[in-house]
Each structure stands twice: as C-alpha cells, then as structure tokens.
Amino acid sequence: MGIDPVVYFFGFGLIAGLLRADLRLPGPVYDALSFLLLLSIGLKGGVELARHGSVDLLWQSLAVIGMGVLLPLLAFPVLRGLGRLERNDAASIAAHYGSVSVGTFAVVVSWLASRGIQHEPYLALFVVLLEVPAIIVGILLARGWQSGVDWQDMGRELFLGRSVLLLGGGLVIGALAGGEALAPLEPVFVDAFKGILALFLLEMGLIAAARLGPLRQYGLFIVAFAILWPLFSAVIGILLGHLLGLSPGGVTILGTLAASASYIAVPAAMRIALPSANPSLSLAASLGLTFPFNILFGIPLYAEIAQRLGGS
C-alpha cells in the first residue's frame, strides 16, 4: 500500500511554500482545524480510556512519563557537546524533542488505520502525558531551580495552553460521556477526522517551508540532529512499548511519539521561560525537518521494527 493520501497534502503545502506561492489558510480556519483535531484525538482517547482503564494502564503511564523526562536529558549533552550550542538554545531544543507532536500522532494513527493495523485505543492519553515533563526538564537544564522563573505563569502556560487543555478536556469529556452519548457528534469528530487532518497538514507544509531558513545559518549539525536523533529516540520508545506489552501497532505509536518533536506547546512555554533562546532554530529543526521526516519515512520504518520485534 502506498503513502497515506494525507501526507500528499503536507507535500503540496511544503512545495507551495518553497515556491513562495500565495497559498495560506486564513488564521481563523487554521485555528478551527487545530481545535477540531486536538478535540477529536482527546475525545476518542477519553472514550477508550473509560473502557480500558486499569492498574496496568497506570504503570504504563508512569513509564511513559519517565521516558518524557529521559529524552531531553539525553539530548541536552549532545546539543551542548557536539553542537556547541548556547545553554538556553540546547535546553530549548532538548525540550522540543522530549515532548511530542500532535500532528505526527494523528498521522501515525491514520497510517495504521489505512493498513488495518490494530493498536491500543487509549494511547491519546500518552500524548497528553508527554507534553509537560520535557518542558520542565528543559527549564531546569537551562536555569536550575534557583532561576527566577515565574512557575505560576509557567504552570498556566503548561496546563492551560491550547494543546494540553484541548487534549485533556477531550479526554475528560470522552471518559465521562462515553461512546454511546457522543455518537451524535461523530460526523464532526470522527467521520471528518481525515479531512481535517489533510487540511491541517497542508498548512503544516506551508509553515515548515517558512521555517527552513535558519538551517542555512547553523549548518549540518542541526540538520543531522533533526534526522538522526528521532531514529535514536524511536528505538527507546519502541523498546519501552515492547516491554510494556503493547501490540505492534501500539509499539509503533509509542516509537513515533518518542521520535516526534513539539511545535505547539513547547515553543509557547519556552517563549516565557527562556526568552533568550532562539525559537526559529528549534522550530526549523522540529517542524522544518523532523516532522516531514517522520511522516514521510519514519513511521513506516518504526512500524517495520515494531512488527519484527513483535514477531509478526
């Protein structure tokens, strides 16, 4: 089976952006798409969380949070030592790569569905859990506990920011209402999901093209890091998923989440906590390179590794 059609929308947006074509979604339309995408993921995860909640899920969640702490701790010395980046830039990029990309999660779920590969349906919970730990670790790596960070404002940004709030709110609503009560909403949040994702990826392609400029300034290291580090992180996620007893589809998703990098929640948080860090550098790596690499090449690779590891 070929490439998932939604990926072509990203490629179309990327090419149009590189050609500087006059093609941009109006801001309110993009906001509406991101709202619907985040709520759709949260609602579906919440419904399945209510069905499958257990002690095993609690232990899995704690292990996933541990991975969210570990990944930026591993990335930081690489960025500082090999990349010779300023401390705040290294910490900010490490936080981006310890957190997750909701768009990448949506693509891997669509990719698995198009191939009939089953997975644990509650994994949207892991997206929520992985948003926050890396941000806290990144701040501590840059500034330590005695940093003068306004943790109250930071807490508001972490937990009341759009991505965490919509995902978390969707999870709660889905868990409380249940699948039967939410059935009338399925035409908006389920049936239209793939169309919403396609338009969202079109805009992501345009944005990614605009973020590639800083890579010319910082050279091959950032390019290499943005492609090679996700492969390393994916292996950690895949091995953890296998140890947790997830299905091959679930292992693929966890590996993809580990390989992804945030371009929504973390940039907003870093803007408050580390204003001297260069946001263009982080976004050029995470959105300009890692995001397209994962959806074009990474996901099939991670799925193949997961299938082989699972013996199927």
Image (cartoon, helix red, strand yellow):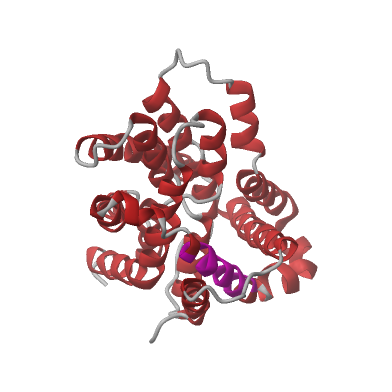
Q: In which quarter of the image is residue 247?
A: bottom left
Look at the image and say whether residue 198 sits in the magenta stretch: yes
Please provide percent x and percent y for residue 163: 61, 48
- Residue 243 versus residue 14 in the image, above or below: above
- Location of the C terminus by quadrant is bottom left
Relative side of 60 to 124, left or right: left
Q: From this viewpoint, is residue 63 visible?
A: no
Is 156 on the left-hand or right-hand side of 209?
right
The segment highlighted magenta reads 196-209
Residue pushed farthest bottom?
1
As drawn, 78 above or below 115: above
How many numbered badges does the structure rendering display? 0
Q: Kindly indicate the quadrant of the structure image that contains residue 68.
A: top left
Question: As drawn, which residue projects farthest toward the top?
Answer: 146
Query: Residue 31 in the image: x percent, y percent?
Result: 70, 59
Q: Residue at x 49, y 48 (%)?
A: 126
**Foreground residue, 151 or 204?**
204
Residue 309 at least partly seen: yes
Magenta span: predominant SS is: helix
- Residue at 69 percent of width and 54 percent of height: 174
Vertical placement of residue 178 versus 205, above or below: above
Q: Residue furthest left?
A: 82
